[in-house]
C-alpha cells in the first residue's frame, strides 16, 4: 500500500494549493500509467444512504464515479478509496460494455446519476476489502492533504467553544469564521 501511495504522488507536478478535482485528475492519470489503461473520473449524484464512490472496469478502461455533492477533500478521499479496489483487484462492477460504449451509455442517453443509482447497491466487496481501501485512502490523504486548499466552514456562536475544544484535542485548527 505504501509503495502504491508513493508511486502515485512521486514527482507529481502540481501547483500548490491544488484544486481537489485537478488533483484527482492527475492521480487518475498516474494510476492509468501504472495500469496501462486510462482511468476516468466522473462526478455523479448517488442516492442518499448509498455508495459515494464506484469503480467500473470495462476491460480497456477504468471509470471512477464519485459523489458530486460533497467537499473536494472528500472527493479526493473517495477516489483514493476506489484506487485501492482497482490496485488490489477487489473486483469492479462489470458493465459488459466496451470502453467506447460506456460514455455513450452514461451520456447523453442516461444521466450518470441514474447509472449511479442503479449500481450503488453493490455488495460484492468484503469488509476486509473495504477496510483495506479505507486504510489506503487515509495513507494517500496523509500525503496529499498538505497540497490542498485549507478547509473552512462557519460555526454558530453556540457551538464555537465545543468546536474549539474538539479541534484542539485533535490537533487541527482549520480556518473558519463564527456566525452570529
Image (tube, grey):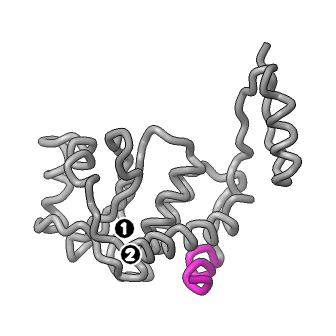
Q: Distance between the residues labelled 1 and 2?
A: 10 Å
The residue under the point 35% across, 81% down is 89
Q: Would residue 132 be found to the left or right of residue 180 on screen?
A: left
Q: For the N terminus, which image quadrant?
A: bottom right
Q: Is residue 132 magenta?
A: no
Residue lying farthest bottom? 3
Q: Would residue 7 be found to the left or right of residue 149 on screen?
A: left
The residue under the point 60% across, 50% down is 73
User: How many numbered circles does the render carry?
Assistant: 2
Camera-near label (1 vs 2) is: 2
**Residue count near mark 2 (Cα–Cα under 10 Å), binned few <14, some 14–19, many ≥20:** many
Q: Would residue 160 be found to the left or right of residue 148 on screen?
A: right
**x, y (%) of residue 121?**
26, 54
Q: Name the residue under label 2.
A: 86
**x, y (%) of residue 69?**
45, 38
Q: Name the residue under label 1.
A: 39
Relative to residue 77, is residue 67 depicted above or below?
above
- Local secondary structure at mark 2: helix
**x, y (%) of residue 27?**
51, 67
- In the image shown, does 39 or 162 lie closer to the viewer? 162
Q: Quadrant of residue 61?
A: bottom left
The residue under the point 16% across, 42% down is 110
The residue under the point 41% across, 46% down is 67
- Local secondary structure at mark 1: strand
- In the image shown, does 99 or 167 lie closer to the viewer? 167
Q: For the C terminus, which image quadrant?
A: top right
Q: Quadrant of residue 40?
A: bottom left
Residues shaded magenta: 1-10
Amino acid at each position: 500500500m505504501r509503495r502504491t501511495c508513493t508511486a502515485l504522488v512521486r514527482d507529481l507536478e502540481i501547483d500548490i494549493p491544488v484544486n481537489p478535482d485537478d488533483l484527482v485528475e492527475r492521480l487518475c492519470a498516474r494510476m492509468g500509467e501504472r495500469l496501462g489503461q486510462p482511468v476516468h473520473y466522473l462526478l455523479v449524484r448517488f442516492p442518499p444512504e448509498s455508495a459515494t464512490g464506484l469503480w467500473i472496469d470495462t476491460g480497456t478502461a477504468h471509470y471512477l464515479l464519485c459523489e458530486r455533492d460533497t467537499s473536494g477533500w472528500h472527493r479526493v478521499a473517495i477516489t483514493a478509496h476506489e484506487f485501492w479496489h482497482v490496485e488490489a483487484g477487489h473486483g469492479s462492477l462489470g458493465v459488459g460494455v466496451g470502453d467506447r460504449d460506456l460514455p455513450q451509455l452514461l451520456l447523453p442517453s442516461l444521466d450518470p446519476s441514474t447509472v449511479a443509482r442503479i449500481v450503488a447497491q453493490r455488495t460484492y466487496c468484503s469488509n476486509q476489502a473495504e477496510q483495506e481501501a479505507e486504510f489506503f485512502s487515509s495513507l494517500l490523504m496523509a500525503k496529499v492533504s498538505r497540497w490542498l486548499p485549507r478547509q473552512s466552514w462557519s460555526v454558530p456562536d453556540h457551538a464555537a467553544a465545543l468546536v474549539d475544544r474538539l479541534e484542539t484535542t485533535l490537533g487541527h485548527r482549520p480556518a473558519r469564521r463564527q456566525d452570529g
